[in-house]
Each structure stands twice: as C-alpha cells, then as structure tokens.
Amino acid sequence: MIETRELRREFGGIRALAGVTLTVAEGERRAIIGPNGAGKTTLFNVLTGEIEPTGGQVRLAGEDVTGRRPHELARRGVARMYQRNELFDPLPARDNVAIAVAAAAGPYRPFRAPPPSELVAADDLLERVGLGGRGAVPARALSHGERRQLELAVALAQRPRVLLLDEPTAGMSPAETARITELIASLDRSLTLVIVEHDMDVVFRLAERITVLHEGRVIAEGTPPEVRGDTLVNEVYLGKVVA
Amino acid sequence: MKTRLAIPLAAVLAAALLVTFPLWSSPWETSRYATTILQSMLVVAILALSLDLLVGSAGMPSLGHAAYFGAGAYAAAIAGQRLGNDDLVLGLGAAILVSALLALAIGAVAVRASGIFFLMLTLAFAQMVFAIAFQAADITGGSNGFSGVRRPTFAGLDFNDATALFHLVALVFLLVLLLIWRIRSSAYGRALVGLRENERRMRALGYDTTRLRLSAFVVAGAIAGIGGALQAYSIRFVSPNDVGVARSVEAFVSVLIGGVGTLLGPVIGAVVVVFIERVMDSYIAFADTVLGLVFIVFVLTARQGIVGLVRVAYARVRA
C-alpha cells in the first residue's frame, strides 16, 4: 500500500533519513520504533508530503508520489494523527471534524450552508472516538486526552486508506492510553496503519510487524517476537527502555 | 420563535430605512449633508467588508487593499469615458473585472507568503499600483486625478440624480452585506476560517490552501472594486489617493475598530472612521489625531472592536 525506496533526507549535513526502504501492505498494521532522533517524524513528514526527500522514492498503492504536495497525498488517502495536535482551536469539536469531512466535497461552495449530512457524519465520528456530547465544546477547552481523541476523529473523517499515527498515546494517562489503544485496534481491518510509538505495550498490542529505525536507517524488521529477540535492537533501543 | 422572527424583521426594517434615508431625512436635512456622509460611509463599509473577508475570516492581513478599490474606481471612470456608454452594468462590470484581475495577478505572488510577509507584499504591490496610477497620466489623469466621472444609467434610471444614486449605493451595500453573510456561513467561509486557524491541518486534510487563499484574495479584490466604482460615481472624481496607503489603512482601521471577523464590525467601523474623518474634522482641528487615539485604545484594550464590546456587555446583562 505504501512503500519507500532508499528514502533520504538531509538537514544541513545532518542525515535524518539515510536510505529507508520499507513496504507496508494493504491492511497491515506496522509500528515504527526507535530512539529519539532516529528519523521517525521525518519519515512521516516525507510520507505526508510536508517535507520533500533529498533522494529516493515514495509509492502509494503502486503510484510514484514522491514530491507530491500534502493536499494531493491527502486526496489520495493519506491521513495523519499528529504527535502535537493540529486542531482548529477556537472552533467547536464538531466543526473541527466537519471541516475534515467537507474536504472531500471541496471548499468552493460559497453560497449555501454546509449540508446537515456533514454535521451528522462529524457527530458520528465524535461518538466513535468517545467524544459523544462534546461536539459544541471548543477544541481548546477540551482536556489533553480529549484533544488526542479529536485529533484521531479529524484524521478518520478523511476516510483514509493509510493512517499515520504519530505517538497516538503521547501525554495520556494509563486509562486514556488503554482506551485509545483499543479504539485504534478496533478500526476497520482494511485500513493500513503506520504507528510511531514509544509505549512498547501499545506497540505490541497494535502492530503485526515492527520496523526499527536507528540513525535514519532500518536496523531490523519483523514480527513483534522477532524484534523482541533481536540483540541489536535490544542494544540500541529496547534495552534502554526495559532496563 | 419570538427572536427567530425578530431578527429578520429588524434587518428588513433597517434595510428599508437605510435605502429610503434621503426621503425621510429631507424635512430636517435640506442641504443633503447627512445623505452625502452616509453615502461615503457605505462606500467605505463595502471596502472594509471585503477586507475583513481576508483579515477576519481567512487571517490574511492585507495592507494594500485600496489597490483593488482604486482599480475599480478608475475602471468605472475610464470605461464610462472611453466607451462613451454610461450603462451601469458596463461600469460595474469593468470595475469588478479589472480589480479581480489585478487581485489575481498580485495574489498569485502574495498568497505564497503569510503573516507579516504577506502584509509587506500586499503593501509593496499597492505602492506599485499607486505609482502606475500616478505615472500613466494620459489614462488616469496622473496627479491631477480623473475628474468629471460620468454617472451611470440603468434600465431608464438616471443616477445623475443624487437621490437615485444614494438608493443605488445603499442597495449595492446591502447586496454586498448579504453576500458576505452567505459566504461567512457557507462551507467556503468555514474553510477560510480553517485556513486562519491551522493552515498545516487544512493541507493535511486535502485542501489546496494556496488556491484557497488566492480565491479569497480575488473575491475580496472584486468586492473592493465595486466599492471603488461607487466612490467614483459618488464624487465624480478618482485620484491616486484612492489606491494609496492612506485608504488601505482607513479600511484596516475600520475593520479593527468595528471588530475583526464579525459581519457588522467592518460596517460599524467604517461609520466611526468616516464620522471622525469627515464630520468631526469640520469642527475640531485634530480629527486625524482623534482617529489615531481611538485606534490605539481599541488595539490596546478591545481587540474584538465595538462588536466585541457589545457582545461582552450583552453577555453581562443576560447573566
């Protein structure tokens, strides 16, 4: 569904991505782990078109989409849950989701009010992520956990084919973490998920395969048991966390 | 149910009172002074309404909005003179077309920047338009201005009659207000707010934000051009000042004093600004200083403008 070949990105001599090749199949749930600075967020920024790669290729459903702009990739089915929420802060939660729902029909409808179906769809999504009844509350007035839920609802409202989740549980309490993890686990199986996450319990709960990134390179890839048993991975990443 | 009917009724009543102002004001107002002032308030209000679509809705602070106003004024004036045709549709059509095209050309570059850089670019481009208006004397009249603008006619109506012209300005103002109101509550208006609040997210959702910003810039420019045409018809004169920075600032100050991002704020702001500039100016020596002070007070203490103050007061009364 989404693949990269020898993807490279340098920032003024610093190699954030030093040739990343990975293939995520349709409907697969892939986690990408690695220490801070491993290139995970840069990889996401390249996959969403927010940063152009210095070299290499990105393919989406077989099509070369390298260098495509963010809105073009979004229209091709790539959605992202940002690590730091990117919401419309003063707007009610419902409008945050409705703007995402409305993206499919486009913005050039200047005379008529948005159709009620968009608001219904927005309310359904809020219900699904556990924000039922909170639709009228401005995004900025929600708790951190609720804002993460809203961030997820906004991404889902795009009806994506590929959903990139950048630390979905960051800053959440254990109860909130458990809830959003189950929510993600319950998503449609045809949706391709790529998850960057530091919480290994969440990773092992959600991921079918794990890619380990270190200094901009893939140093290991496999099923959760395989990765857990990999000595190099334990040395550079898991070891530090577990020990 | 009571309020659902009350607001539209009040709006219709206010609109009717506005359009008929010269008729019911004539007993106490023989010199037509108030009508003239009100007419220029409406013209500035159109300019301010169009600017607030950028500043308030889309978060695009243009400091060169008079360029499109002036382009509309010149276009209406020149079209009437060169084509020897006073048809209103032709004059307004020329104003809309020229200001929209100018906004398209400038916007194509300017909307790629945002915030302070966008502001500086719009200002710089407007200064270029000002210089062109100044230099191209054989078309625009240069520093002498373009005098003797021909007033339009439409379907047997002759807008050389001052009362008829006021009706026209008031009616066009109401139509612009209605248009802005519809845009603000449409999917398009909501997308502009999305642009203002989080452009990165809008891109990630699949909105082509560059195109969206450009579209807003062109729509706002075209509406400003309508205001410019009405200004040219009103005072029968266009000068480079109509594209100058002072007029851009006048519109910006109107928006800020009245209330950024509100429907009626720009209108109220235009009324206050024109009142200080035109009416108070006849009675006191430092009207411009007063305007400056009012502006400073609002920027420091009431960022939401007069509409914001009224909302706060209303909430207190209800609580």
Image (cartoon, rainbow, N blue to C red):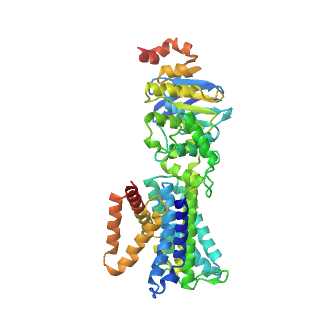
As displayed, is residue B173 above or below residue A90? below
In this rendered view, identify the residue nearer to me: B22 or B243. B22
Across and down, in percent, residue B37 comes to: 45, 78
Across and down, in percent, residue A43 comes to: 53, 31
Number of callouts in the render? 0
**Which residue is rendered at x = 44% and y = 86% of the image?**
B28
In this rendered view, identify the residue nearer to me: B303 or A135. A135
Across and down, in percent, residue A195 comes to: 54, 27
Quadrant placement of the N terminus of chain B: bottom right
**Which residue is rendered at x = 60% and y = 54% of the image?**
A113
Quadrant location of residue B108?
bottom right
Res A188 visible: yes
In this rendered view, identify the residue nearer to me: A190 or B60. A190
Res A19 visible: no
Across and down, in percent, residue B136 comes to: 53, 75
As displayed, is residue B209 above or below residue B1? above
